Image: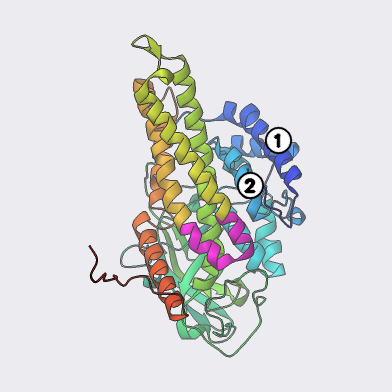
Amino acid sequence: MNTIPAAGLHPAAVEELRQRTRAFIRDTVIPAEPRPGQALNLAVRRELQAAARDAGVFAPHVPVEFGGQGLAVEHWSSVFQEAGYSPIGPAVLNCMAPDEGNMHMLHLIGSDAQKRQFLAPLAAGDISSCFAMTEPHPGAGSDPDALATTAVRDGSGWTITGHKRFTSGATFASFAIVMARTGADAEEGAEPESAPDAAPGPTAAPAGSTTKAAPAGATMFLVPMDTPGVRIGNPIHTVDSYLPGGHPNVHFDGVRVPGSAVLGEAGLGFKYAQVRLGPARLTHCMRWLGLARRAMDIMLDRANTREIFGAHLSQLGIAQEMIAQSVIDIETSDAIIAKCAALLAVDAKAGSALSSVAKVHVSEAVYRVIDRAVQLCGGDGVSDGLPLAQYLNEVRPFRIYDGSTETHKWAIARRSASGRRRAVAAGEPFQGTARIYEGER
């Protein structure tokens, strides 16, 4: 467990919350899990959420003033992993994507009025939300600069036009955070470009403040789903099934919103996205690592009791190799998550960069652990008698969602190479020259 001191709960209180969460997931949530491949019934979800509130484990990441447990980001992992031990646990505890990331961003960037209208009911579990960013080709996907949805000024408000897809949770969402290209229309209300690399956060300019600079780019808008012109299109059927609300297409057909719908400052959508995406990548890692621990327990219970060729599976060398590699995958994932969470707490930009490394490693490590569990459980592993095959379906998209593995590797390599160039330019000794040894053998 990560025990780095935080501004929120002290380590002993974090451990106590983790233990309560662990007990609640095992005693209350797991018995209520739907059959593998089936979505959680919304009525059952509401009942379980009420039980989570009574148990004092609801919304662990949400500030206390909004009804949560007040857990600081560097302490999220141990609790989120306990929630993720059940595939429905994060939804029950209201720390599931996309709501969890939207709550975090609203808390840091939203105006007081936006927090009252959107964050308070979202944190309470009374409503759900979605994040409308991904678009059909040639729109935004792995390359956010391809953003095609537009928002143009319309009197005192804005008119949004575009088509989004993979808008996770949209079917049941009460509102969307919509990313739209605004360009020169964002001139009023934009933050100056004096610090383009500064990560926005609690010190970002308050919503509604005005300056003269106009950084070209995008703007985030808070759009209620019942706004005229918002239309949910065809669903996208994917291998994962536990996320309520699916991943449908959403159309914004001349959607008019007031000026107060702008989240943060107009023109700074790409910068604000880092407030959400860094922690959101990492919380996915936390939740899925919890599920990998569940798969590991299933694998070990089977290996300790299944006899083959005169010995338990756990005594056979090939099975021991698979178990050992799974332990290594879990422990290395836990370590990089803890390091990244601690960094996010003190340096959002550096933490967001490291979250790419964490996302690549953990998404692949978690899949390996669950795949080995399937293999060691044989025929039962690929049946719905055990939940492992569905776990594979749930975690496989993680290597694509929130940026594909290949896109993150590209960004990781670019940052590494440019960082080294800057270091050498600043005086760090150059290490790339081959030495010539004359007269020596």
> Most prominent secondary structure in the magenta stretch?
helix
Q: Is residue 40 magenta?
A: no
- Residue extending farthest to the bottom is 212
Residue 120 percent location from the top left of the image: 70, 57
Please tell me whether mark 1 sits on a helix, a strand or a loop.
helix
Residue 361 percent location from the top left of the image: 43, 49
Answer with left or right where residue 7 lies relative to residue 394.
right
Q: Residue at x 46, y 72 (%)?
A: 180
Three-letter residue code for mark 2: Asn
How many other residues sit within 10 Å of disc 1, few (<14), some (14-19) or many (≥20)?
Answer: some
Please tell me whether mark 2 sits on a helix, a strand or a loop.
loop
Viewer-side residue, 71 vs 425: 425
413 in relation to 193, above or below? above
Which residue matches tag 2? 2
Answer with left or right where residue 38 lies relative to residue 276.
left
Figure quadrant of the C terminus: bottom left
Disc on res. 20:
1
Q: Where does the magenta region start and end?
A: 340-356
